[in-house]
Amino acid sequence: MLFIALVISACNTSIAPIKLTGETMGTTYNITAINGHVDQSDLKHRIDLALGRIDDQMSTWRHDSEISRFNGDRTGSWFMVSDEFLRVLDAARSVNQQTGGAFDITVGGLVNLWGFGASERRSEKPGTDSIKEKLAHVGHGKFEIDTDRIAIRKIDPETEIDVSGIAKGYAVDAVAEILLQSGFEDFIVEIGGEIRSAGRRPDGTPWRVAIERPDSGNRSIQMIIALDNASIATSGDYRDYFEIGEKRYSHIIDPATGGPPENAVASVSVVATEAMAADALATGLMVMGTEKALGLAAANLLAVMIIERSGDDYRILQSDGFEALRRASQAN
């Protein structure tokens, strides 16, 4: 959905990297791996199987997926899920607590109401009463996770969950794990703009990625940073949205209000060890707004860059952790 371009400069031609591409989760993936000694077609097959499995579990666009079947259940009974899906749900619960509820996967009903889910797209704001009705079923206390049973159940039978703000990050981590288990030490994985790197490029320098300027029209680069065995995710309001007059309504939903965030934040980029954490935090910090987001970043030593709209221009704000990464990138 959001785009972070891979920037890979000229490589040592004596080392031919493996490059794999494909489609998954309604978007594309791109993988570059160095120094592996595996069959390329077998590697791609294993990666595609893993990504297909994750899509089977977590896609709200598939009526037969685990998440869709859970959303359709109204019994309140324990619902058995896969280990991977439970891991994502447990991580989402952790980020929900970390962000004071700003990241909340129980906004599924609101995502559909606003036309950003598997339901029909819309170009107008939902009615106040409809928003209030869906908002009544939002909150992490509306469903329960049992890690021993490997199961979940609804406390509120009308609650619907949506893991689109964390699932792509998990998928990136899952592919990275396959590469590590296959003996690769140097690689970069990108799925729908979420990225994880390991090791170095063939020339010995860090992998470099470009963070996009949050313009809805022409695509351009805001900043290039080097990734040192790290992940990066960006969330923003400039790709999936609709406008009424001069007001923009993005796909990100604030669980406190039931609608898109009412702040000046255009995009948030987070660098973390795992892509799943970076993905969820980027969404949660978008909802929190600049001041609270930077406060959370400072308290938790997070590497965060926020791009705010300021009239016809943008204002860039960075946590100390991200500023250190930017300086290191300039030195490499």
Image: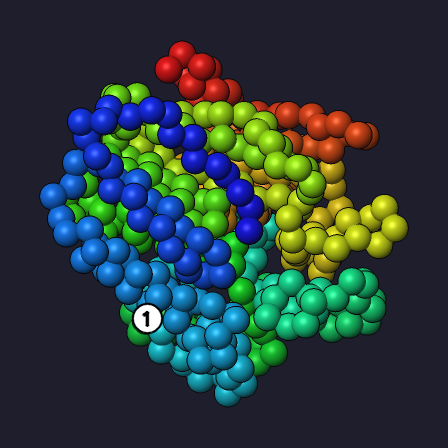
Q: Residue furthest right?
A: 245
Name the residue: 60% across, 50% down: 102
Q: Is residue 287 visible?
A: no
In-image side of 6 versus 32 (left or right): right
Relative to 57, residue 262 above or below: above
Q: Which residue is mark 1?
A: 82
Name the residue: 81% across, 30% down: 311
In-image side of 41 versus 95 (left or right): left
Relative to 205, residue 8 above or below: below
Q: Which three-letter amino acid code belongs to the residue tagged 1?
A: Ser
Mark 1: secondary structure? loop
Name the image quarter holding the C terminus. Answer: top left
Q: Residue furthest bottom?
A: 75
Q: Is residue 191 visible?
A: yes
Q: Residue furthest front?
A: 13
List x then y, in percent, for residue 185.
Answer: 20, 36
In-image side of 309 versus 296 (left or right): right
List x then y, in percent, for residue 145.
Answer: 41, 68
Tell me if mark 1 has few (under 14), some (14-19) or many (20+) residues whose alpha carbon lies within 10 angstroms of its own. few
Q: Residue furthest top?
A: 331
Name the residue: 48% across, 37% down: 5
List x then y, in percent, for residue 317.
Answer: 62, 25
List x then y, in percent, for residue 296.
Answer: 55, 35
Q: Say which of 143 and 193 sits in front.
A: 193
Name the residue: 41% across, 80% down: 78
- Numbered-mark total: 1
